[in-house]
Amino acid sequence: MVVVGAGPVGLTAALLLARRGLPVLVLERHRQPYAEPRAVHLDDEALRALSDAGVVEDFLRISRPALGLRLLDARSAVLAEFGRDPGAGLHGWPQASMFHQPDLEDLLRAAVEAQPLVRVERGAEVTGLEQHGHTVTVHLADRSVTTSAVLGCDGANSTVRRLIGSRMRDLGRPARWLVADLRAADPLPVWPGVHQVCDPRRAATFMPVAGDRYRVEGRLASGEGAADLPLAGLLASFGADRAELVRVAEYVYRAQVADRWRDGRVLLAGDAAHLTPPFIGQGLGLGLRDVHQAAWKLAAVVSGEADETLLDTHQAERAPHARALVRLAVLVGALMTGGGRSAAAVRRAVLAGIDRIPAVAAFATDSRTPPLHAGPLVERSGRAGRRLAGTLLPRATVVVAGRTCPVDEVLGAGTATLTRAPGGGLAVHAGGRRTRLEDVGGVLTTHLGVARSVVVRPDRIIRSAS
Ligand SMILES: Cc1cc2nc3c(=O)[nH]c(=O)nc-3n(C[C@H](O)[C@H](O)[C@H](O)COP(=O)(O)OP(=O)(O)OC[C@H]3O[C@@H](n4cnc5c(N)ncnc54)[C@H](O)[C@@H]3O)c2cc1C
């Protein structure tokens, strides 16, 4: 298998494919890793991909729980505050984590280097693709490689996307933001969550990242350049004026999803397939979900266990999910920072006291993303099926024969069935074995509700429930 691009999505894909026994060649055009910070937030659903890739413990060491969201007006008065309990997640990790993207990429590269089935070739720019039957020939500047399938994780300006005739479709208007990364020798006296300034004239965001790192971002108006953003004043308004400026970069945030995610045995994932504004921190999270859900399908097709039509489900499942989250990011951005002076007044009135309504607070901090749409691998029939199919099974802690472990260890690498055992408790049927387990804290029992049996796919998504 060839993975194009050694960004975080391509490296995670390589680890997931290798764990399924596939030799992987990662082709990366740059000779040196990209060292600049970008993503700072991942939710606990996306961590499931890092867990199956074998790197979640390392990720927890370089990240810290995200502690909530504070909405501020133009004068830094708090409009609403949504705290987040770091212990409340369904998967045994904080619902949201903050991290420095180069730290994540470092640990992914270390894991890839330790994985004998993965080889990364740098200075290898993919320029062409040809498909013949069950093979794909990948053209580089100086040679060609023939392989069984290609996963294009080659980022926003994806060559693979262009080569399969796919185009990005806009879901919103682009916006220019100035992004500044900061460090502080001593912890800054700031609220520990994300601060969002809901000022249509100068939307801005500030957040502690991890360790001694902080990030501030400000939206640029049309015609404005970096020098027009009053960075020092912005930092002072957050109590961050003591911080040292490490890097300032201008980004154009786009809201786009590709119209074609697959041609034969060539698939797209990550920023190659979608781009999102940052408001709900989902760009990388979407990419990790893409490869978590694609890896087992590709492994099954390449090994001959499954027909190539299995790959039809890649776009059918991932594109609507990506569109839903990109649209949500556009909507949340507009609600928090859109409109003019009158919109700001309405926002102030609506937000007054809203954080004290439990349902709103729960919604604002819930890390669950929409279920996958119904399809051949998501059977949303019956009462239990309609509620559960397409959602991620909680990574509950269970006890098996006196040993405590995450349920994923019992589910194994293939499809598994979880049933209520006669006389109470739960049982997992996987790989021809039945394992009885105790559900610590009742997380699974509560999640299953009335369902007596659920079928769980290799990517931990519930396929059907009855
Ligand atoms: C300021 C900012 C803040 C962000 N914040 C968040 C956040 O909080 N949470 C979040 O989830 N996401 C966030 N994102 C988005 C996140 O950073 C991206 O979604 C993520 O980096 C995409 O990873 P990727 O592996 O798909 O692509 P990339 O990291 O872009 O990697 C693509 C790789 O492919 C290589 N490549 C390209 N073309 C070729 C070719 N022809 N041949 C060989 N190699 C090629 C490139 O050199 C590159 O190494 C943010 C982005 C920005 C800019």
Image: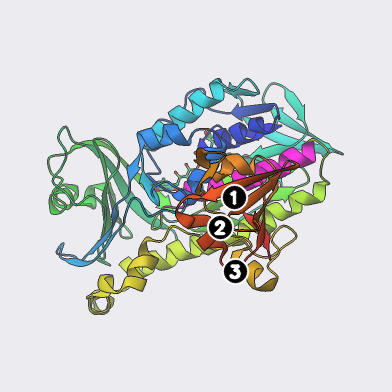
Query: Which is nearer the N-term, disc 3 or disc 2?
Result: 2
**Which SS does the magenta portion mostly show?**
helix
Which one is in front, 142 or 412?
Answer: 412
Query: Mark 3 or mark 2: which is in front?
Result: 3
Contact flag, marks 2 and 1 (Cβ < 8 Å): yes
Q: What residue type is labelled 2?
A: Ala
**Rendered image: mark on residue 190:** none
Query: Which is nearer the N-term, disc 3 or disc 1?
Result: 1
Residue 124 position in % (x across, y down): 61, 25
Q: Give the SS element for disc 3.
A: loop
Query: Mark 2 or mark 1: which is in front?
Result: 2
Q: What's the distance in space between the residues labelled 3 and 1, CA to CA?
A: 37 Å
Q: Give the SS element for disc 2.
A: helix
Residue 372 position in % (x across, y down): 61, 61
Q: What residue type is labelled 3?
A: Val
Query: Which is nearer the N-term, disc 2 or disc 1?
Result: 1
Residue 456 position in % (x across, y down): 66, 52
Q: What residue type is labelled 1?
A: Ala
Q: Does the residue labelled 1 lie within 8 Å of ligand 1?
A: no
Q: What's the distance in space between the residues labelled 2 and 1, CA to CA?
A: 9 Å
Q: Give the SS element for disc 1.
A: loop
* Residue 301 lies in the magenta-colored region: yes
**Magenta residues, start to end:** 281-302
Q: Name the residue under label 3.
A: 450
Q: Name the residue under label 2.
A: 322
| Residue drawn at 69 percent across, 59 percent down | 316
| Above-or-below relation of 47 to 364 | above
Would you call the spot at circle 3 few (<14 residues within 10 Å), some (14-19), or many (20 or more)? Answer: few
Q: Quadrant of residue 20?
A: top right
Contact flag, marks 3 and 1 (Cβ < 8 Å): no
Q: Mark 1 points at which residue?
A: 273
